[in-house]
Amino acid sequence: MKPVFIALDFPTAAKTFEFLQTFSEINNLSVKVGMELFYREGPEIIKKLRQKNINVFLDLKLHDIPHTVEKAAFQLAQLDVQYTTIHALGGGKMIQAARDGLDAGSKQYHTKTTKLLAVTQLTSTSEAQLKVEEQVDVSMPESVSHLANIAYQSGADGVIASALEDEFIHKKVNKNLLCINPGIRLNSNNNDDQKRVVTPIKARQLGSDGIVVGRSITKADNPVETYKMIFAEINGGK
């Protein structure tokens, strides 16, 4: 089944677990912990989530020299998270260093190997920004697939990209490379700061391997029922 990662964009652990109380009936729940929550609560928040058998996607987007990233990834391995992220723009050597760090850390701490996801272009980045600010003289799909190929060749398990690029990535890089997609909204939601957004159904049609959903669930009148609906949509109603 394709996971739906609930983005836990809460400022504290207390608010996080208050929200998660209503999800006690959901088996194999997956969540995303980002910078705000992790920087506030530290590794303890991850430990508490794992104690509840919740799958964790730790989204810190590591981006530094290869040696530093390798050491950081080694330490992240002890948290026993299922996924973590780096920036593909850090290059092949940095991505490989992250892979090496996670693999070595999992052996040292006797944890399952964490899947490494490389962030390509943020879903808040527009085509105009790509060309004017980043001075990238190719289309968005070409830029994303180029970074995805570097990630694939350097040991990443998958990439973070808009679902709009999934077909291009699977065709140009490798059909087995995981494409995990943020920028997912329901038809009734506004786009907030995201530029390249799609619905859960559209993401499935484009070949998504999993989606990240935040406000559409966390700010819904009934978060659990909204989660169930989105999970059914990304998995074809199964």
Image (cartoon, rainbow, N blue to C red):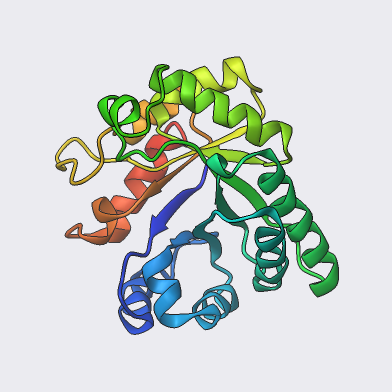
Residue ID at (36%, 69%) = 36
Q: Residue at x 42, y 17 (%)?
A: 138
Position of 33 relative to 85 (above/below)? below
Residue 42 in the image: x percent, y percent?
49, 80
66 displayed left or right of 120 = right
Residue beneath the point at 38% across and 36% down: 233
Percent across and percent down for residue 165 are 44, 24
Residue 118 at least partly seen: yes
Dividing the picture into quadrants, the one containing residue 130 is top left
Which of the pair 133/58 is nearer the observer? 133
* Left or right placement of residue 79 versus residue 224 in this view: right
Q: In which quarter of the image is the N terminus?
A: top right
Q: Inspect this view and state whether residue 1 appears.
A: no
Q: Quadrant of residue 206?
A: top left
Give the answer, above or below, for where 205 lies relative to 217: above
Q: Position of residue 184 (x, y in %)?
A: 32, 40
Q: Is residue 238 left or right of residue 7?
A: right
> Is 198 or 100 nearer to us in this picture?
100
> Residue 13: which quarter of the image?
bottom left
Q: Which of 178 and 186 is in front in this view?
A: 178
Where 158 sits versus 111, above or below?
Answer: above
Spot occupied by residue 19 in the image (x, y as percentages of width and height): 31, 73
Which residue lies at the image location 73% right of the left edge and 46% below the top edge?
96
Observer-nearest of 59 and 55: 59
